[in-house]
Image (spheres, rainbow, N blue to C red):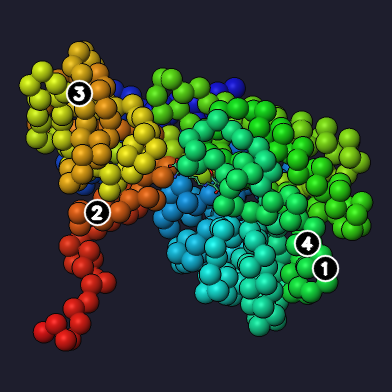
Amino acid sequence: MKTANQNIKPITTKINENGNIEIGGCDLVELANKYNTPLYVFDEATIRSMTQSYKKAFEEYPNIKMMFAAKAFMTKAICRIMQQEGFGLDLCSGGEIYTAKSSGFDMSKTLFNGNNKSYDELNYALSCGIQTISVDNFFELALLNDIAKSQNKTINILLRITPGIECHTHEYIQTGHLDSKFGFDLTQLDEAIELIRDEYSNINLIGLHAHIGSQIFEKQVYFDEVGVIFKEIKRIKDKYNIYLHTINLGGGLGIKYTENDAPISVYEIAETIISSIKEHSKKYEIEEPTVYIEPGRSIVGTAGVTLYTAGSSKQVPNGRKYQAVDGGMSDNARPSLYQAKYTVEIANNPKGTADEKVTIAGKHCESGDILAKDIMLPEIEEGDTICFYTTGAYGYSMSSNYNRVLKAAAVLVNNGKSDIIINRQTYEQLCESDVIPERLN
Ligand code: LLP
């Protein structure tokens, strides 16, 4: 069965009677006029269809805990939707913990990841009642034990490991290979276990965590990841008589940015993971563990689009045609950071013949601020509403104020209704943290 991550467009996308693109029953041109651009538009139905696909796909393995990787798109409204869908949250900074907590999220359904969690962040995480911490390194183990002791608590932890699995994705978003900044090398695991057993009495080791990368299209890497983790669990059981009953497999399921992408469905990934767990449980004679998964991109990526308004254009004599829009690398860093490609349409002219080769440029003072290079579109006119699909993940969450450009707004659409979930930043907010020291007066 197909799942929404295999579409380029949100599941409610259509062309309406005005001849414009409509998502969630809302005309994109009207949204652009009402809320101004750049604007992130999130289709609630697509988000929920993904959370529900995950739940359904893992139905036959009830001992599963779905944790939305908040780094993909974190706002209070998304936390609320995840809570309603029965998802937990994978959080990776004090700011994400604060956002979850202030949205009223049940913190007993959260876990905390990251390779350099600070004292303040760990202290805050514990006082907020975070359920599990994935510990990345020896430094953090010692720090966390001290903090837990000072709060008179015992904290459940997973040890993050680098399983030595390479997946075919962009180098910057591979994480499970051996030369990685994340997690314990397998050869360091025993030392960590012995430290916990002998010295860190406020730490309760419950399992292992791995995350092999992001935007993954292959099934086999997940099968292998489970195998590597089980092998360690068996080894640890035999050597220390400690049974680690929880495993966290991370996130990573890919989405379809362009026609060249062929991501697998949630059902395929679930089937792979479940069959690998069954096979390895049998092989190593280990009870089937509690399994966490942390999908981020696949939950929100396809649901989100970004709208821009076409502004100036430039035809280089005998060269490229550049069409500038009113956003760029500040609202979507992915093209300049990863050479990421997107599917683009003109929201007010989706049916026009795509007979012009154009390069969509951002408005930032940087030649590398190109959102889409050499794509075919109908001729763009000034004022057109340009729609970039699949910007829901790692768009807003990696946005910046480069050039002091304001952060864009986001709306959630559903059944013909649109609601602001992030207000457009104001100039006042932009300068809110700026201070002129007295002596400069
Ligand atoms: N768990 C851990 C420990 C992670 O580090 C990540 C993503 C996830 C889960 C969620 O992975 P996902 O399901 O979203 O693939 N900024 C990059 C992606 C970086 C991913 C970082 N970690 C991009 O825009 O492609």
**Which of labels 3 and 4 is toward the front?**
4
Q: Which circle marks residue 320 in the picture?
A: none
Q: Is residue 184 left or right of residue 6?
A: right
Instruction: Quarter of the image for the N terminus: give it.
Output: top right
Q: Secondary structure at mark 4?
A: helix
Q: Which residue in the protein does label 2 denote?
A: 402
Measured in 3D between alpha carbons, the distance from the residue under mark 1 to the one under mark 4, in whole angstroms, is 10 Å
Measured in 3D between alpha carbons, the distance from the residue under mark 3 to the one under mark 4, in whole angstroms, is 56 Å
Measured in 3D between alpha carbons, the distance from the residue under mark 1 to the one under mark 2, in whole angstroms, is 48 Å
Q: Secondary structure at mark 1?
A: helix
Q: Which residue in the protein does label 4 denote?
A: 191
Q: Amino acid at mark 3?
A: Val
**Which of labels 4 and 2 is toward the front?**
4
**Could you classify mark 3 by the number of other residues whose Cα lies within 10 Å: few (under 14), some (14-19), or many (20 or more)?**
many
User: Measuring 14% from the left and 21% from the top, which residue is drawn there?
Assistant: 319
Q: Earlier in the sequence, mark 1 or mark 3?
A: 1
Q: Which residue in the protein does label 3 denote?
A: 358
Q: Earlier in the sequence, mark 1 or mark 2?
A: 1
**Could you classify mark 4 by the number of other residues whose Cα lies within 10 Å: few (under 14), some (14-19), or many (20 or more)?**
few
Q: Secondary structure at mark 3?
A: strand
Q: Amino acid at mark 2?
A: Tyr
Q: Quadrant of residue 13?
A: top left
Q: Residue 153: where, in percent of width, then height?
A: 70, 76
Q: Which residue in the protein does label 1 denote?
A: 197
Q: Amino acid at mark 4?
A: Glu
